[in-house]
Image (cartoon, rainbow, N blue to C red):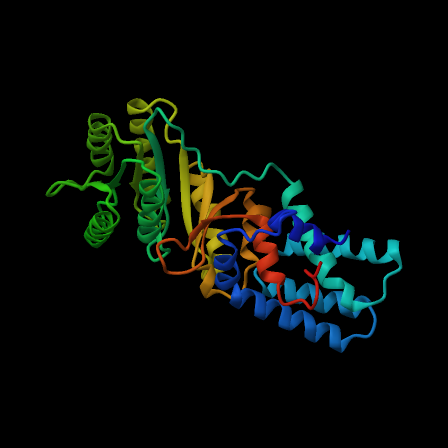
Amino acid sequence: MSFFRKIREKIFGTKQEKPANLDKYVAGLTKSRLSFFKQIVQLQKKHIKIDENFFEELEEILIMSDISPNFVRTIIDSLKAEVRHHNLNNPDLIPEIIMDKMYTIYSNRSVVNTNLNIKDGRINVFLISGVNGSGKTTSIAKVARKFIIEGKKVLIIAADTFRAAAVEQLEIWANRVGALILKPEANEKDPGSVVFRGLDFAIKEKTDLVLIDTAGRLQNNVNLMQELKKINKIISQKVPNAPHESLLVIDATTGQNGVSQAANFAKITPVSGIILTKMDGTSKGGIIFSIKDQLDISVKLVGLGEAMDDLQPFDLDLFIFAITKEVKNQYQV
């Protein structure tokens, strides 16, 4: 059975039932899908056989799609081995082999865990970081809304004391989605103090989930490291084994700059997962693979649009299906 058929069966099952979030993936990844496969089709038309020139141009296409050079080299080497082993010479076969290799390499390098660590019977604490403009504020609101709909009592702690506008925006969003919010008091500049009060409030109110917004400055790593270290210490003292998630928000449209941001944050504080925003706004979906390859951190949520329910759990099968949907006849039964 071909790789594309396997993906289709995993997604639709034997009853051919369409997953509820499939349309969001297809719509949200339109730019990446059309850009990537337009280039692949052009490459196929240009070459009548698979040779070294073909591989060189393919390598350039993959790198320009924001896939890290190291991951691209692994894909190309694997492709060459496959072509030699099966004596392949038809460029039309390449798209399926590419996606098969990317899927296999991504999923085999380590355990892929996209589930958020939230459990009943405890106060769940998520620490959320990200540079200004990454979509952190709206992502926090969307995560809050998701769990409020599921019946959870959610508190947002606005601990980014360096940006008054961020606190105001969070308050607006909290009110919209029905979350509780704890803000800094007048002239309260210490994020640790805000977190301390917030967790006391969460314990008193018996909240199910606490979302802590932290400052996103990378200009002074020493200060940020000390700040996050202090916040983590306060959290662990107030809530055993917390934080249960340390999520980093990355703007997908920033490409390799976003991967560099993630690398810098990972040096400062443990990162358990990535929230990858604005995937609908980029034509270069390869950042998903770069993050996994360079940092070995799982993308847990992807932003596929501006609507409140467009922040979706990352699903590799749906991602592959959505970005390869234009390849002719691949998903026919």
Q: Is residue 67 visible?
A: no
Q: Is residue 298 visible?
A: yes
Foreground: 125 or 232?
Answer: 125
Foreground: 147 or 20?
Answer: 20
- Outermost residue on the bottom side: it is 46
Foreground: 172 or 75?
Answer: 172
Q: Is residue 258 left or right of residue 32?
A: left
List x then y, in percent, for residue 211: 31, 39
* Quadrant placement of the C terminus: bottom right
Task: Please report the residue visible at 71 percent of the width from the left and 69 percent of the height from the top.
Answer: 57
Q: Is residue 181 left or right of residue 217?
A: left
Q: Classify residue 113 by image quadrant.
A: top right
Classify 237 as above or below 115. above
List x then y, in percent, for residue 85: 87, 53
List x then y, in percent, for residue 301: 46, 48
Q: Is residue 143 left or right of residue 188?
A: right
Task: Please report the residue visible at 71 percent of the width from the left and 73 percent of the height from the top.
Answer: 43
Classify 260 as above or below 114. below
Q: Classify residue 157 by image quadrant.
A: top left
Task: Please report the residue visible at 76 percent of the width from the left and 52 percent of the height from the top.
Answer: 78
